[in-house]
Every structure is written in C-alpha cells, then in structure tokens.
Image (tube, grey):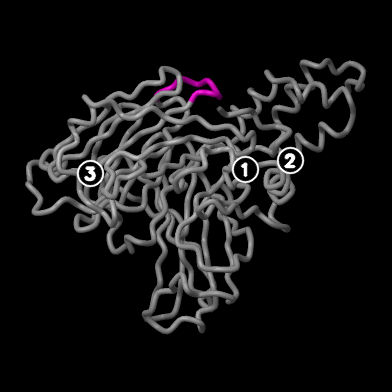
Amino acid sequence: MASPATLTEDLLAEIFLRLPEPADLVRASAACVSYSRIIADRAFLRRFRALHPAPLLGFLEGKRFQPALPPHASAPAARAVSLAADFSFSFLPSRGRWLVRDVRDGRVLLDRAPEGERRPVFSEIAVCDPLHRRCVLFPPIPDDLAASVEHPLRMGSGHWCEPFLAPRGADNGEDETSFGVVWMTQCKSKLLAFAFSSSTRQWRAVASLAWSDLMSGAVPSRSPALVGRQYAHRCFYWVMYWQDKLLVLDTRRMEFSTSDLPPGCDKGQIAIVEAGEGRVGMFTLRDHIADGAVSLHYSVRRHDGDCSNPWQMEKIIPLDPAFRHYIRGAMERYLLLLRFPEHLCSPGVHVSSSVEGVDLECFSLDVNTFQLERVCDPKHHILRAHIYTNFPPSLSSQSI
C-alpha cells in the first residue's frame, strides 16, 4: 500500500474529485493546508462542479429564502449560503417591484413592469447572483422581434409572457459564467420564443409555431392555458389545460412539440424530474379518496414507440394518509413536497394561502434514492417554491 508521502497532488486531486458530496470536500479541505490548496484551485473546482450536481440548499418563495434546516444533509451548506447571500436583492435598481421568476445554477431571474405601463407585454429583466451580489440588466427585445408578437393573450393585469433561465450549454456554450434566457409568449394563434445570450448580449428569435400545427392540423377553439413550467434534461414542460397534454420546448433544437400526460393524473399535482441515464421522470400525486390512501406515482418516459401511453410506471411511494400533501416544486433530480395534518382541512377543500400557524412541513425527495428528507417547517402556506441548488460558498464560483 502506498504511503501518504507517495500521493502526489495530481493523484490527491483525482481522489477528491470522487468524493460523493460537496460537504465531504469541505471537510477534506479543513483537514490540512496541502489539501486546502488543492481543493481551492479554480481548475479543480470547475472539474468538481462539472462532475457533481449541486445539492438542494432550500427554496425561494418570492424574495424569501428558506434554507434547509437540520437534520437535512444540506443544512450546513444552506446555512453558510443564507449568511453570505443577499436574497433581498438590495443590489438591484431600487425603483419598481422586482419579482422572482426563475432559479437555476445559483442564478435568479427577476423581472418588473416598465414604469408607467399598466398591461405590459415586455418586462424589464435582470439575472442575479445573490451569493456574490452581482446582477446583469437586460437590453429590451428589439423592435423587429417585438413586432412579431401579435394578439398576446391576457392574464390577470398583464399578458401571458414568461421569461426563464436556459440550461447551461443550451445557447451559451459550457462557460460557467455564461448564461442564457428564453422569453416566451402565448398569442391567440401561435407560440413565440426569443433567446438572449450573455456572451453576445443580443436577443434572437428561436421558435415560433402556430397552434394549428402544434395540434396536428386541428384548429383549437381557444388556446390552451399553459401552467407549471418545469425542466429536465434541456427540455421545458408546461401542462396544457383543456388538452391533457404537455407542451415541450427542446432547447437543443429550440423546437416546440407535445407529449401525452399519464391517464387519470391530477394536472395540478405533477412534477417533472431528471431520471438516470438521460431519461425524463414524472411524479404524480394520487389521493385515493375511497380507501384513504395517498401516494406518489413515479413514471419514466419511454422511447419504444408506444403512443398510447409513453409513461412507464416504475415506483409507487406511499405517503402518510394522516396528512394532506401538495407538490410545490421540482428541480433536476429534486422534488419538494408540502404537507399538513388532514384533520385541518375539510373533505374536498383545498388549503389556501390563509392557513397560518398550523403544523406545516416541507420535504425534499431525491429521485436517486426516493428518500423523503425534511427541509423545514414553514410558518405559512406555500403556493409555489423555486428550489435553490448551489455549492457551499467555499466551492461555488461567481456565476455572473
């Protein structure tokens, strides 16, 4: 057996790259000065981050960051991030109300309505790195691209327009400091998407498709409502209400398509995740009212040409029927569940944001292990959460 003296720095670096969790690397760095020097090297950290997915550290609800608390495995790193980062985004321009719209790779996308516009189609967009307190303000979408947006559908006080962060490598190479944004709108007769690259600092048109083409020649009586944007393996997914389908945007080809939903699922309780070997997984929450059972059904998308049901059931995870459960977020391999005691909710009545002071609990589920792990006990009901994944401050890079 080789003695410690024969372990070169290159060999030690290869050993450290194989540590399973970022927390293990932090502990190794604290062991001695020579280990710390190897691990602090920028080239080594880039390799480690490329090989290991960032852990779930908590979630954002609006501008409120809720870190994972003990005994969650990520609690120490989550606490370090919560102390170092500025999730109030005080470094943004102060005028106007900035809203969190997306979170990915340690970055947060926010937007706000232009000053003086009551029903804006195009919002002002900023991408922030709260850990290093930096931001990038985006130029407006050029007039020639904006002119192609005809009859955008209205939603609430504005229009159905959605900016979100593109996955690394989709439109910007593999540089850690580069990123992309997709801006998508739903018009009366078609879908449109534009993309922005931080490398070129320019917007470009990337996808446009008429509803009649998306529906295989059928002309829908009304455009499907698109809700619940989710992501897995460089594709974005939306539930298409009234159609029992998923809308898919493949960022590798920047093309729209549709996919069938599993039969009998609750369209409001679906989560898309990254399964192993490049596959796409789906969790659906099933409440068996007749027998009182509650469970998560896990399916994986098949590629065997069976068009009748492309989803293959792989696992059923029973949940405690003494609690009411809700899917509140998903990111890559993680699922976020909210639960509270069943006796606090009348049969057939959904919990509302007015529920306060009850025994709320949030759990994460890792698709690699299917183990539920308590994240925190929130003080109020959560309608939607943006899962925040990142490395501890000592291992993270400046992402902007």
Amino acid under label 1?
Pro
Q: Does the magenta-highlighted stretch encompass residue 5? A: no
SS label for mark 2: helix
Choose top left, top right, bottom left or bottom right for residue 35.
Answer: top right
- Which quadrant, please, contains the C terminus? top right
| Residue beneath disc 1 | 55
Q: Position of residue 114 (x, y in %)?
A: 35, 41
Amino acid under label 3?
Gln
Q: Are marks 3 and 2 in contact (CB under 8 Å)?
A: no
Mark toward the start of the polypeptide (3 vs 2): 2
Mark toward the start of the polypeptide (1 vs 3): 1
Q: Residue at x 23, y 31 (%)?
A: 146
Q: Residue at x 77, y 15 (%)?
A: 10
Q: Residue at x 51, y 68 (%)?
A: 381
| Residue beneath disc 2 | 23
**Residue ranking furthest to the front:** 116
SS label for mark 3: strand
- Which quadrant, please, contains the N terminus? top right
Q: Which mark is residue 186?
A: 3
Q: Residue at x 65, y 54 (%)?
A: 68
The magenta segment is 171-178
Residue 309 in view: no
